Amino acid sequence: MRVTISYPPKPPAKICRHVMSAIVLIGTAVSTQARAASELESLAQLSLEELANLEVTSVSKSSELLRLAPSSIYVITHDEILRSGVTTIPDALRLAPNLQITQFTSNHYVAGARGFGGAQEAQNFSNKLLILIDGRSVYSPLYSGVYLDVQDVVIEDIDRIEVISGPGATLWGANAMNGVINIITRPAYLTEGISSTVGAGNQERHASFRFGDKPSQDLAYRVYAKGFERDAVELADGSSAGDKWHRGQAGFRLDWTDTDDTVTAQADAYTGDIHQGQRNNVDVSGHNALGRWQRRTNRGTWQVQAYYDQTERAQPQDGAAFDLQSYDIELQHQIELGAAHRFVWGAGGRWHRYEIVNSVPLAFEPSQRNLSLFNIFAQDTIALTDSLDLTLGLKLEDSPFAGWEAMPDIRLGWRFAEEHLLWAAASRAIRAATPFDVDVVERDSGTVFLMGNESFDAERVDAFQIGYRGQVMTALSLSISAFYNIHEDLRTIEPTPGTFVPLRWDNLMEGETYGLEAWAKWQVTPWWRLSPGLRLLRKRLEFLPGASALLGLEQSGNDPRSQALLSSSMDLPMDLTFDLSLRYVDDLPEPAFPSYHELNASLSWRALQNLDVSISGFNLLDSRHQEYLPDSGRWIRRSVIAQARWRF
Amino acid sequence: MHSRHLSRPDRISGALAAALMLIALAITQTAFGQERYREEAVKAAFLYRFAGYIEWPPEALNAEHFTIAVLGSGQIATELERLLPARSIKDLPAQVKRINRLNQLEDAQILFISSRHPQSTASIVRALRSKPVLVVTDRPNGLDEGSVINFLSIDRRVRFEISVAAAQKAKLKVGAELLSVAARVRGAPERADRPCTSFENCACRDQCLAYALVP
């Protein structure tokens, strides 16, 4: 008995009413009410099976996070990702209004939140944002920052990407300073069957294949493989920037559940070749494996997670390379104590072992080390009243160069009315010192011109935030948050008195940053959603007495003061969806670089029950545009890609 | 960099064209009418239909109304308020009741915990102490936290998962058809015992094939 339901037949009267409402005014209260009533009437007649086969529009999935920790959080949903037609993780991250994504070259992207997006000229990287894929940190402990070019998953297996701006150090530890990005893939029992995607465009080609199965009621798994290649972008004169890249990856995920236990095991392996124009090419490869066991008992939920991650990058031309291995284990226990306390505590350890093959210009001394980190944390969410929650948290972390650091966090959430949350938070977070801050030795024609500083301290922030999130009207949800950050011990570069070189890292900058993040989701009509977003940022930094002020305050990052995003998402007749995303990035202050606008668009058609085809265009407004200064930024061409996804 | 500025008129005309396209699409779309249902309305319809496939112990139905209580309110409660009046469930007049605390539950047969409700499902389920209430949630770890039915969003559709163990704890019997439509069943009886009603349901595909081959 095969049941294939598209939509229940519509009585002609309904169509008439829609035409009428178009003539009068879209979305007047009266017609909306009437439509809702008739919609419910027809839904109530359907069988379970028919209900389960209806396609729906949802106003906003982020509402379910209202009950989570009061913070500035944006959730990029599975649907948003698929509809946008993006093919890489950094491009997907552009969908979050509280992130700053800059594309430098064909393969080099930088993600930042609340400023400090890095200044390439000063060898300062975007190092205050933590990224995790299914609970595995992909933040590099070597240089602090994330190699976005090797982070990948099967795009249609992403369940959601949670983007938290502001500190998340109590739960995620050091480097979750200005934000945390959690990329979460779907459990295997939601990815049954075969799914294959191929895409080809004027600048990239990709293909992925996934097979999922559920051998028993409790056990499901999937295996996948994907390949991706993208062409080089351009230099100012129109010639190739020589930065093409390709990558291949394969892996699996297995989920097992019974009444009280949930076990997940997953692993990935990848290899790729990344060209960097005049600079050396990089061969990248790595693999990782993760296991997680959750057990629910009468005394709360216990979770143990462990992972192994190996990653290496090598430049065949000059032999420079590194190989990094990480082992991580953590334990968490969540328990409710009485009606008023939700308590979670945990402890974890992480070990890194790395080996660096130094090159003449860039060396680490020592070139190999074992690093270890330990942490313990506890967080209690106390229901002070029915509508007022107080969250107190503290993480103590022993990191390799800084020793024990305390990262406290206090938050208040007040649901002052149904579906309206006001929240405030005060937190301390750090960006831990890395071998790049401590061990680095850079030489120029035999002379040492930059050295690490073994007394380099962690960079610190005390962050104060206030925010509102709620459903302003049935069709309109809104999130606004303002932050005020006090930064201490920001990294500077200091000359040696008398001889000038070698330069050394130090912590001689401090100051404050403040800003605003706001976004809304407005369901204009049941088939059309508009989502505006805005970020504002101001930085007031200064050097401490004794600082040389070499490279200026701009070495902390050349961040735009504002950024705006406007997305439109339409469900059209005949199983078409049409999405537009317009972004504006203000000029970069120092060194100055002009502002830009760009537009992405994607049209997708469900051609058959199991076949989706789409055509997507990126950066459509200009034949080419640039997002960063010409010394490291390249000209990115307008791109168009056609994709087909087939499932059975 | 200069060419960026030279191309400004192009960009403006591009934006204009996009705006025109949007308006054109909006008009077309309005004329064609809406084809997709609202998620909340579909969930409300599910909540109304679930009862037909669940067996409560007789004392639980010894009431004046069949009550769906909604903890934490939200749009689904509003949809239920539109849907339930003048309908009956299990031969009782159906009603929806918005509640803020569990002690307002009284003799409700279904408890829907809105995704906006701050309290954890685990503590609510514990406080129910095996009372015969069908707990339905709409959050990623709903079943882990002890609910009987949890809504999922799969491929733009509203689906649901069921914990048979949680149902047994609440002294509820789950009908076979509900199990067969569920996207996922946890703690299910042995496969051989499960009747098969749907070919689409992957959980019993092998069995269905057998039915198809041996008429």
Image (tube, coloured by chain):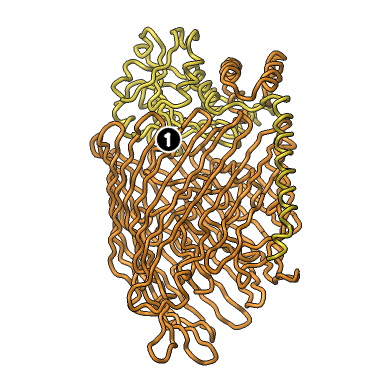
Q: Tag 1, which chain?
A: B
Q: Secondary structure at mark 1?
A: loop
| A75 horizontally vs A338: left or right | right
Query: Between B46 and A204, which is closer to the camera in this rendering?
Result: A204
- Which picture quadrant has residue A33? top right
Residue at the location (50% across, 87% down)? A443
Q: Note whether A417 is above or below A633 in the view shown.
A: above
Residue B195: percent from left, percent from top: 55, 24
Query: Between A149 and A616, which is closer to the camera in this rendering?
Result: A616
Q: Note whether A528 is above or below A603 in the view shown.
A: above
Residue A125: percent from left, percent from top: 49, 68
Instruction: Identify the residue position indicated by label 1 in the image.
Output: B142
Examine the rendering and report whether any part of residue A5 can be seen: no
- Which picture quadrant has residue A129? bottom left
- Which picture quadrant has residue A236? bottom right
The amino acid type of the residue labelled 1 equals: Gly
Residue at the location (50% across, 20% down)? B79
Image quarter hosting the C terminus of chain B: top right
Tint applied to chain A in the drawing: orange
Q: Which chain, by letter, is yellow?
A: B
